[in-house]
Image (cartoon, grey):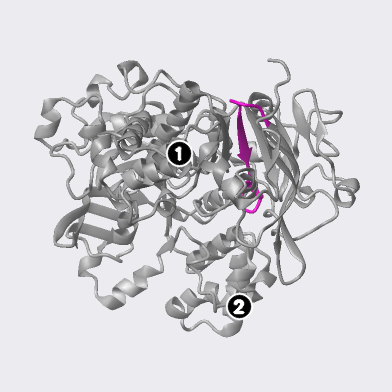
Amino acid sequence: MAAEAPLIELRGLAVRFPAAAGTVTAVAGVDLELAPGASLGIVGESGSGKTQLALAMAGLTAPGALLGGSVRYRGEELVGAAPGRLRQLRGARIGFVFQDPQAALAPHLTVGTQLTEALRAHERLPRAVARARSLEMLARVQVPDPAMRLAQYPHQLSGGLRQRVLIAIALMAGPELVIADEPTTALDVTVEAGILALFASLREALGMALVLISHDLAVVGGLCESIAVMYAGRVVESGATRAVLTAPRHPYTHALAAAVPRLEAPPAARLVTIPGAPPEPGSRAPGCAFAPRCPRAVARCTAERPELVPLATGAVACHLPLGTGGG
Amino acid sequence: MSAVIEARGLAVRYQVRGRDFRALEAITLSIGAGEALGVVGESGAGKSTLARALLGLVAPGSGQVLWLGQDLATLAPEARRRLRRHVSVVFQDPVASLDPRFTVAASVAEPLGVHSPTLGPAARARAVEAMLERVGLAATLGRRYPHELSGGQCQRVAIARAMITRPQLLICDEPLSALDVSVQAQIVNLLDELRREEGTALLVISHNLAVLRQLCSRLLVLYLGRVMEEGPCATLLARPGHPYTRLLLDSVPVFGAWPRRAALTAEEPASPFAPPSGCVFRNRCRHAEDACAAEVPSLEALAAGQRVACRRAAEGVASPAGGAVSPARR
């Protein structure tokens, strides 16, 4: 494929929250882009800024949040765009799937109403047509007995079915981009496997681009062609999934991959640990945020923040990336 | 070998809006000194009810719970209090399980006030400091309050509080699920260390098979309140006998492997209020036959130490070659 114009392009995106003492920075200058139909996994722990980043990509902000930098969707700037225009884009072009399907569905509206609401907000459609599309979409996300489900309320559905309904809502208007924020975290492993398989088959069938946010490298690695690893509000490593998972360049990515026990690997006598804990959001040290926990850190790491530098297969923000001399 | 804790034919039933809810049925288990048993299952399997019943926090509808060989139901309150120091618990949410108004040191010391009331203040403070250090916290942290600590630190405090009475058994109910990925490994290593070095037996409840393999020598697979399979962890993970264990195994995301192994069952668990007749898993099982609906399968020996509640276990239905849900994992 020749250099295609990106579907979405982030340049220096920052999300800050006003606080008693100055501002707290949740996302501190992120550059990312995604081609139409591509898939990107964003991995990070709590407080890494991944959710705020996901929201900003859909032109959404948490209450009080201040956006900086730029988010361009097919070249159109979303930061500072009129709320009406953002609403138009969301739903019509960008679908969002939230983490907690219980909280994201309105408890007093039927599944059918919530599905068609999404549709009727963006296109003027006769009721019967909207209903037919809802049925089709529920079937597409593999909800058994869709006609019965249309008349039900969220509390009558299991967690897995609720998440399928949320995905159906996000897909109703045929978006080009779906952003899913920890869509399986609230679910059992067996149900999670089904939802992830659904995302994979939907992408194949509908060709939409996908941004998947997760704390789980394995979840993201199974579904996305590329990965961005976030730590303390910044992308510390990005690249093709296979490269990032099999030969991580950033010590944090490496430690994260090693710290998670995996069934397919032989059992270890002792798990590799990352000492300490992630920094509090808002704490601002001059150097690399991971330096206090990093076994490779040298004086320069605490003095000077490393920039995200392009590599052959991706990019890394580290003064001493793994796989270079002495790595 | 005498068991630290035992359950014999344990059943717990709740009445929910007039409907009978069988949270646990016919649970028999035993944990020896210094041993670690893992309990795995989906939400609604009865994992937390099992923890509560073993702690004596819910009364069994039938069956017995024995602490150090003594039946909880027949113990006098005073004797029960004396034994309680030997059975401790660590809950899922470390922040919620600590009193926000107590300093760390006060929280850790509190069980000593109940179980060792004769201990003087200086001796108590020394014991608390030693325990904080034992779980990898600086003794100076004792002056802090829970809100000043990270989730991982709070979980270490909760473990210190549970361990201060030198219990013979530590029950851990999803001890990692509230923690960040990078911190989980620290707590796994700490629990394993306490078992090996202090001889504390563990009962670890988790939905994460890889974590259970790391910590436990034996595994109990729970589904809708019943034991589907139990036995040595290594055996169950390498050669599961129950199709449900196979389903759990195949659901675990594998690093860099996609698309996931073929078709997973789309069916979700049956309602615990109206479990299927016979085998409760049969509505999700692709190996189910008419006979599976007729009677509840009993736990039968399959391999050394492995017992499986499936009529067709001996046919190898849960083995990858048996045409189960997936092609082989290595």
Q: Give the vertical position of A71 relative to A80 (above or below).
A: above
Chain containing mark 1:
A
Q: Residues within 10 Å of mark 2 (few under 14, many from 20)?
A: some
Rendered location of residue A98, percent (x, y): 49, 46
Q: Nearer the viewer, residue A293 or A63?
A: A63
Q: Is residue A142 magenta?
A: no
Chain containing mark 2:
B
SS state under label 2 = helix
User: In this rendering, would B70 be left or right of A301?
Assistant: left
Type of amino acid at the residue the image marks with label 1: Glu
Type of amino acid at the residue the image marks with label 2: Ala
Q: Nearer the viewer, residue A158 or A279?
A: A158
Q: Identify the magenta region.
A: A34-50
Q: Is residue A312 visible?
A: yes
For residue B125, the mark is 2
Q: Is residue A44 magenta?
A: yes
